[in-house]
Amino acid sequence: MKGIKLRRYHAPKYDEPIIMEMGVKGQRGILVPPAEKKIAEAVGPAADILPKKAQRQTPPRLPEIDQYHVLMHFLRLSQMTLGMETGIDIGEGTCTMKYSPKVHEELIRLSQMVDVHPLQPESTLQGILQIAHELESFLKAISGMDAFTFQTGGGAHATYVNACVTRKYHQERGELGKRTEVITTQFTHPCNAATPATAGFKVIILPQKNGYPDLEALKSIVSERTAALHMTNPEDTGIFNPLVDEFTRVVHAAGGLCFYDQANANGLLGIARARDAGFDACHFNLHKTFSSPHGCEGPAAGAYGVTEKLLPYLPVPLITKEGDKYHLDYDRPRSIGKVRSFYGNLECIVKAYAWIRSMGPEGLRTVAETAILNNQYLDHLLLKIKGVSRPFAEGKPRFEQIRYSLQNLLDETGFGTHEIQNRMVDFGIQSYWLSHHPFVVPEPFTPEPCETYSKEDIEYWATAIEQACKEARENPDMIRNAPHSQAVHKIKDFNQAEDADRWAITWRVYQKKKNKR
Amino acid sequence: MKIGLIVNPVAGMGGRVGLKGSDGEEIHKKALALGAQPVSPKRTIAALEALQEIREEIQLFTYPKEMGGEEAEAAGFKPEVLGSIISGKTRPEDTILAARDMAARGVDLILFTGGDGTARNIYDAIADKIPVLGIPGGVKIHSGVYAANPEKAARLIIEFMKNPAGISLRSAEVMDIDEDLIRQDRVSARLYGYLTVPHRKGLNQASKAGSDPSDAVHHDGIAMEVINGMEKDTLYLFAPGTTTKAVTDKLELPGTLLGIDAVKNRILVGKDLCEERILSLMAENPKEPCKIIVTIIGKQGYLFGRGNQQLSPAVIRRVGKENLLVIATQNKLLSLENEPILVDTGDPELDKSFEGYIPVIIGMGKRMVYPVSR
């Protein structure tokens, strides 16, 4: 691309030990002062508060290390990674890595947020309940649903709760015994297969036909055993299924429920609503579309919404309004019960609320239109690059993200998506994400240029892909040995991730496995 | 890296002259008489030329003359030539000897040019002990051991050497069709066994939540699903393949990999059965329900008609379509690249009844609907 200069970048690199290997005996972070006399007398020894059985016999084997060195350690680690706000994060498709306004971080640090406790009487939590209640009304308008819960702590949690609601719905109708199957599609997020399975359903996956879920396959399998359909639209590929209302019609005719996974609704805001496509329930990831934001930068919230007929089953408590007072309604005998402590991740709710308020109805539609427009521009740039292709649904439009393939590059050069992925980080941007499992599109990558990226960002990202593809032809070692400027240059043996004897997620397990070898 | 090179000089010669294979001296003569030209030398040289960038790092072992020596030299390699042959009269036994000699020299990989007959010979010699990669040169290419073309074979070898992290080894089916029968317009492919083949990861790794569990994990889930659903006093016929074998393994029954086994009440009541034995087993209790547990065989995706002909139309009709349990890993279904599952029992009417969609068990409590065609 003309006029785009790929940045020179090098990650800081520290030969940093694991914190468990650090520290010196006797070093400490904080000296906790003794309690004041009156408090000590009133409360008694702190250890007595814990039941005997819960008390440790030996102290934990933690490293003894002072604050300063803990801070240095973690700052070094953070410098050795790429953050979405130091590099363009277009590559993480389906994750909706948009820029989230910093002023919203200020809101959740206000005293009204940090100094309240969920066990306070509801009369003293009116402000926060009002925000949640009003956010619910916004999401109702956006989706067409009749009620939402914010208890669900993430997208997969919301799909799981939907499976639980489905179970309860059929149970009340005396049909749970026979309605044992949940249907999903190949390009719907895999949690839509996993969570109904966890809830006790059998799962049936529909294949795709030229990029669209196969309607005839649905008709062949739908029956009195069908409990629900879990699907998304547009799917992971960015392809919008124009027959979506036919899918919900077929499943409803068989007596099943229809759930719309709207984890990423960035291309739909103000354009299409779940209810109008015939769905009985849906969810939004506040941390994606609603900017609360996504990833390790904050907690998540999978707002789960339903139509009237499923409302009785929503988890407790629901936030209700009587006159000008807000209440936490626990008296809901048909509810599936509690699915998480308290009322959900309030900081997500506040930030999503602030984001919607700052956008306004017109703004929301502009978000979707801009995200789609950005995607068309990136698509235009990427398809000009030799080696990149866009499988399925030839000539059909894509929404806000696209799953591309580097199979042609692999055929031509022997380098595919893993090698190009390794090279991307050398240009100071996040490595891209490939695909959900399974890899239906060969050698996949899935960018999503959200509305907050500039024209130049999109050009920069496409240029990085173009450069890497060019190097695959002209300078194979550059690609083969990438990344060159990262803190970690290359994972020596990728297969070890599949060998349980060779990885550990805790220090204790690591020691155990290491000693065993 | 030590590489063994085996060229089947007569592979592929039958193809152009319509002979559906080149096995056997008579057919070979017939092919020559019809003006057949050798296919494999050119394809081998193309692959070796694409290996130029790592030529210095390869220690090449091969067999004399047209079995690899000539091709290697034409591509600028200086191979160590093992064994001896009668030029112009090479036999399947030469392939077997070559593979054994190379194994004895400790090669890291055997590269061969040929078809299913050649793959079978190599399998006979070394089973799954050494990675093998085929350059498709034969008429019959039903096995899963080949790279798509000579250039891709070379690229796979370069990455196998330079970037082993990007390559995994998997078991691939060795299939062969009985050439006498195919010449009479009857297809009868047998599953001979499995070779270890380098494979570029892609279809089966790096999902968002981390790495994908290996096929062994999926096989285990499939086996659990089948076993949980097994009913009393029902005759289960297990078709060939690693997926069905995973179920008998889980049942701790000594089932066969390549034959049809019968299980009732978790007891093995028949092993490596032919059609006649299956029918007589079913005739013992005519009213007893019977089910077939079958997987997809071969890269073309056959459910019936390849590798499991013992499950004849008569057997399938007796069992009934509704009593079929089709099992396969999702990766296997994806490897069909959107092409339907195929049925070719030899009974067109029966085949027609399969057209449409079939649920395939892909894991514990998990099915995928997949199109079936004739």
Image: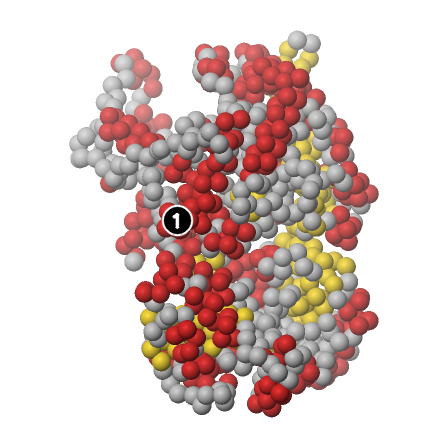
Residue A419 position within the rendered picture, expressed as x and y whole percent measured from the top left: 44, 48
The image quadrant of residue A483 is: top left
- Closer to us: B22 or A516: B22
In the image, is B58 to the left or to the right of B29? left
In the image, is A491 to the left or to the right of A246? left
Disc 1 target residue = A475
- Closer to us: A172 or A286: A286
Name the quarter where the N terminus of chain B is drawn: bottom left
Name the residue furthest top. A324
In the image, is B342 to the left or to the right of A500? right
Q: Chain of mark 1?
A: A
Where is A483 relative to A361, above or below?
below
In the image, is A498 to the left or to the right of B284? left
Q: Residue at x 54, y 37 (%)?
A: A447
- SS for dot 1: loop
Going by the numbered disc 1, the residue's amino acid type is Asn
